[in-house]
Amino acid sequence: MTRLLRLCVPVLCAGLVSTLTVAAQQAPAAPPAAAGATRPAPPPYVPKNLKVLPDNTNLRVVMRAYAGALGVECEFCHVGPDPVTHRDGDRASDANPMKDVARYMIRMNDDLNEKYMAQLPKAPDVDADAKIQCGTCHRGHAKPEAFVPPPRQQGNRPPGAPPAGPPPAGAPPTGPPAAPPAN
């Protein structure tokens, strides 16, 4: 048996090598077309229920920008996934009332940019292309935080204010109360 194997294996290998060499040199034939193998391209995505944004809006880019500016996830404005099936919610649905708030804020943003920002006088220190965006006020928070200016240090004055002089006669004193006289 070993003798037979010793004779057959080299013959089989030589035959296999020569067959593979000839097959590799021939041009590959076109693969046969299988029935139903070529699928037509899916139709382009057509957004539904757009009431404020233009139809040609790249929704993926715009929605990610909104989510980043407000520091929220999609479910903040859109219907969340079904808790039973775990399928994504219907993004076109108006069931979440925050979606109407978002539409109102988008309109407000557009109005501010068209009516006011476009009328800014051109000045060297003003960006002529400045636009108000969601992040201008929200800064990564769902509810914009109130701006509280830092307290002014005693003696500092706002830029452009005249230097402080003595108070007019009869005016109440300003500044910290005077210390009581030492006994």
Image (spheres, grey):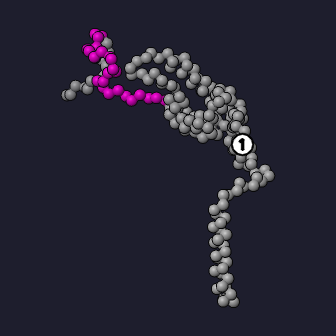
Question: Residue 153: within the magenta?
Answer: yes
**Quadrant occupied by the N terminus:** bottom right
Question: Residue 126: within the magenta?
Answer: no
Along the line of sight, the residue nearer the viewer: 174 or 110: 110
- Quadrant of residue 168 within the rendered picture: top left
Along the line of sight, the residue nearer the viewer: 165 or 174: 165
The crowding category of the residue bearing disc 1, from other C-alpha atoms within 10 Å (few below 14, some 14 to 19, many at least 20), is few
Along the line of sight, the residue nearer the viewer: 37 or 93: 37
Q: Residue at x 25, y 26 (%)?
A: 180
Q: Residue at x 19, y 28 (%)?
A: 183
Q: Residue at x 67, y 29 (%)?
A: 55
- Quadrant of residue 41 within the rendered picture: top right
Image location (x, y in percent) of residue 92: 71, 35
Image location (x, y in percent) of residue 140: 52, 36
Farthest residue toward the left?
183
Range covered by the magenta-colored residues: 146-170
Examine the rendered structure and indicate whether residue 133 appears above or below residue 32.
above
Q: Residue at x 78, y 50 (%)?
A: 36
Farthest residue toward the right?
35
Q: Is residue 102 visible?
A: yes
Q: Is residue 177 visible?
A: no
Q: Secondary structure at mark 1?
A: loop
Examine the rendered structure and indicate whether residue 40 appears above or below residue 31.
above
Dominant secondary structure (helix, strand or loop) of the stretch shown in magenta = loop
Q: Is residue 134 left or right of residue 173?
A: right
Q: How many marks?
A: 1
- Quadrant of residue 46 within the rendered picture: top right
Query: Which residue type does callout 1 highlight?
Result: Ala
Residue under circle 1? 41
Image location (x, y in percent) of residue 34: 77, 53
